[in-house]
Image: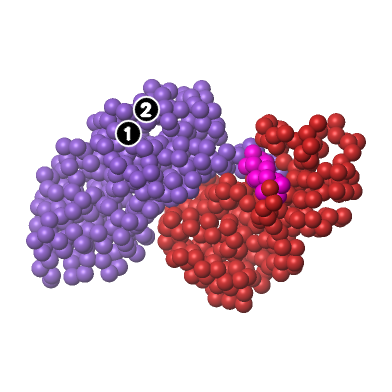
Chain colours: A red, B purple
Amino acid sequence: MSDKSPVIVDLKFIPDEVDAALIGAFPGRDIINLANPAHADRDLSGIDYAVVWNPSLDLFSRAPDLKVLFSGGAGVDHILKLPGLPDVPLVRFVDRSLTTRMSEWVVMQCLLHLRQHRAYEARAKKHVWEDLIQPEAADITVGVMGLGVLGQDAIRKLSTMGFKTVGWSRSKKHIEGTETFDGDQLDAFLAKTDFLVGLLPLTDDTRGIFNAELFSRLSRKGAFGAPVFINGGRGGSQVESDIVAALEKGVLHAASLDVFEKEPLSKDSPFWEMDNVYVTPHVAASSDVKALFAHVQQQIDRLESGQPLQHLVDREAGY
Amino acid sequence: MSDKSPVIVDLKFIPDEVDAALIGAFPGRDIINLANPAHADRDLSGIDYAVVWNPSLDLFSRAPDLKVLFSGGAGVDHILKLPGLPDVPLVRFVDRSLTTRMSEWVVMQCLLHLRQHRAYEARAKKHVWEDLIQPEAADITVGVMGLGVLGQDAIRKLSTMGFKTVGWSRSKKHIEGTETFDGDQLDAFLAKTDFLVGLLPLTDDTRGIFNAELFSRLSRKGAFGAPVFINGGRGGSQVESDIVAALEKGVLHAASLDVFEKEPLSKDSPFWEMDNVYVTPHVAASSDVKALFAHVQQQIDRLESGQPLQHLVDREAGY
C-alpha cells in the first residue's frame, strides 16, 4: 500500500468522462471515486485530499481529516455553503481549457444574437430565402461584468471579432484597448452596453444583481433597439422573473442563459420555449476532467514539496 | 446640371437599405437607381459608371458607354458571365466590413458545430437538461481553402478562438502561425482538416471542387469522427448532390452552407430540413451598402484625378 494519501473524487459530472480521465491520474495513490458503489461504506478517515463538485452531503462527516479541498469548477459558491465544510484551504479550478471554453460560449452567443440566427432558422424551417438588415460586430458594444481570468479572455476575443467592448468589476482592472469601470461606476458602464455579458462570481454583493432595475439602465441605442443579456457566470446573480418580464416587455431584446437560480432548470420554466432565449444546461465552460486532475496533482505536488498552494479561495470575498 | 458623369445603380439588395445608403452618396452627381421605375425608359448612353449586383440583362445595351464597372460584392463570377459585358475595367468590392462580416459567419459556424448547438437546441425544445461530452476548439483543425483577404482574416480569428488552423490556396501564401499548402498539396491539407471552410472564388479550376471525392480525403480523426463542411464562398464550387449523399452516409458529420449552385435555394432542397445542416441565404458577408458607395466614390476620385484603379479583376484568372 502506498504511503501517499489517497484522493477522494466526488464529481457530479458525466460518469464516463470522469472514469476516462481517471485512467493514469494520481500515480502511486489510491483513487476513491464515490460514483462507484463499491466505496459506499469505505472508511474515509485519514485521507488528505478531495476533489468535489456537488458532493454528497455526508462527505465531510465521512472524511473528517481532509487537509485540502479542490473545487471541480471555477465557481465555488455552492461549496462555500456546504454544511460541515471543514476549515481547510479550498483551491479553485483555473485552467486554460476552462477559460477558452467559456470564451467559445460567450463569443458564440454574441454572434448568434448579432447574426440573427433564430430569425434565419425560423425562415429556413419554412424554406424561406430572405435576407435581413445586418448590423456588424463593430456596431455593438459588449459590456462584460466580471473581469477575472474569464472576463479578460472574453473581452480579448470579442475585440478580435470586431465587437466594441467595455468592462466592469468590483475593483479597478486595466485592459489594453477596453474602457473599464469599477465599483460605483456601474451606471456609466450600463449606459454604454448593448450586449451585457455576466461572468461574475456569486457573492453577497452579486446575488440578484441582474434584475429589472439594472436591465432598465442598459443602452437602448444599439442596432436592435433593446439590449441583450448573456449570463455564463452564476444563476444566483440573476432574477429570472425579472428577465422573463423584461423580455416580454421589450426591455430586453433577447437572452442567452447557461446558468439558473435553480439547476437543473425546471421543466416548466418559460425560458425553454421563448423565441428570443438560448438555454444551455450549465455547459458554457464544462471542466475538462483530465485537465482538472492534472491541476489537482500539480497542487498536491506543490504542497508535498513545501511550496504554497495556488488559486486559493478567499472565503471573506466569497471567490 | 452637373458635368460629372452620373452613376447607375443596379443592385438586387434589400431596396430600403440601398435607398438609405444613397442619401448623401456621390455628391454632385446624378444617381440613377434602376430599382426606381421612373428610370425604366431613361437614356443611359454617355454614362461612365455603373455599380451592379445581378443587374438587368439589358443594362449593357442600354448603357453602351460605361468606362468602369463596379461589382456590388467580393465575388465577380456572375458578372464575368453576363451577356454583353463590356471590355472595361471591372472593380471588385473590397472592404473592411465585408471581410469582418465573413469572419463573423465563419467563426460562428465553426462554434455552432464545435459546441453542438443543434443538439442542445433539440434538448431545449423537449425541456431536457443534459450535458454532452464537449471537445474544445484546440481539439479541432479548421482547414481554410482560399487564402485571399477573407481566408486570411478568418484564419487569424479562428486561431484566436483556439482552433488549430491550416490553409490551402492555388499559389503559396505565408501566414504566421498557420501551416499553408498550395496547388498540388491538396491531399496533405485535406488529411489534416476536421472542419473544411470554403472561401474560394468561382473559376474554371474551382467549379465543383467540393465533391464526393474531395470529402472522402478529409480527416476522420477529429472529435466528431467525421468532417464538417462550411461554404461561404461560391455555390458553383460545390456539388450539392454529393454533399447530401455524404451527409446521409456519414462521410460528412454536418455542414453550413451560405451559397448554393442555384440561388435562391429551391423550396424543395433537402438542405432546409436536414438536422445537421445550417442554411443561410447568401448573407455571410452581405455588403454594407454605405461602405460600397464610399468605395466606389473613392475609386472614381482616383480615376478622375489620374491615379490607377484598385482591386481590378483579372479576367483571365476569373477573380
Q: Are marks 2 and 1 in contact (CB under 8 Å)?
A: yes
The CA span between labels 2 and 1 is 8 Å
Mark 2 or mark 1: which comes first in sequence?
1
- For label 2, the SS is helix
> Which residue is nearer to you in this view: A106 or A60?
A60
* Residue A294: in magenta span: yes
Are discs 2 and 1 both within one chain? Answer: yes
Q: Find residue B289 and name its label.
A: none
> Which residue is nearer to you in this view: B317 or B264?
B317
Q: Is residue B205 visible?
A: yes
Q: Where, by quadrant of the figure, is residue B136 drawn?
A: top right
Q: What is the x, y in percent for residue B95?
A: 30, 55
* Residue A8: in magenta span: no
Please state if B167 lies on the left or on the right of A65 as rendered: left
Residue tagged 1? B181
Q: Residues within 10 Å of mark 2 (few under 14, many from 20)?
A: some
The chain letter under disc 2 is B
Q: Where, by quadrant of the figure, is residue A2 drawn?
A: top right
Residue tagged 2? B188
The residue located at (32%, 39%) in the rendering is: B146
Note whether A187 is above or below B210 in the view shown. below
Note whether A168 is above or below A59 in the view shown. below
Q: Which residues are magenta?
A: A288-304
Please state if B213 lies on the left or on the right of A80 as rendered: left
Q: What is the x, y in percent for residue B85?
A: 16, 43
Q: What is the x, y in percent for residue A55?
A: 80, 46
Disc 1 marks a residue whose amino acid type is: Phe
The residue located at (12%, 56%) in the rendering is: B308
> Which residue is nearer to you in this view: B194 or B261?
B194
Disc 2 marks a residue whose amino acid type is: Ala
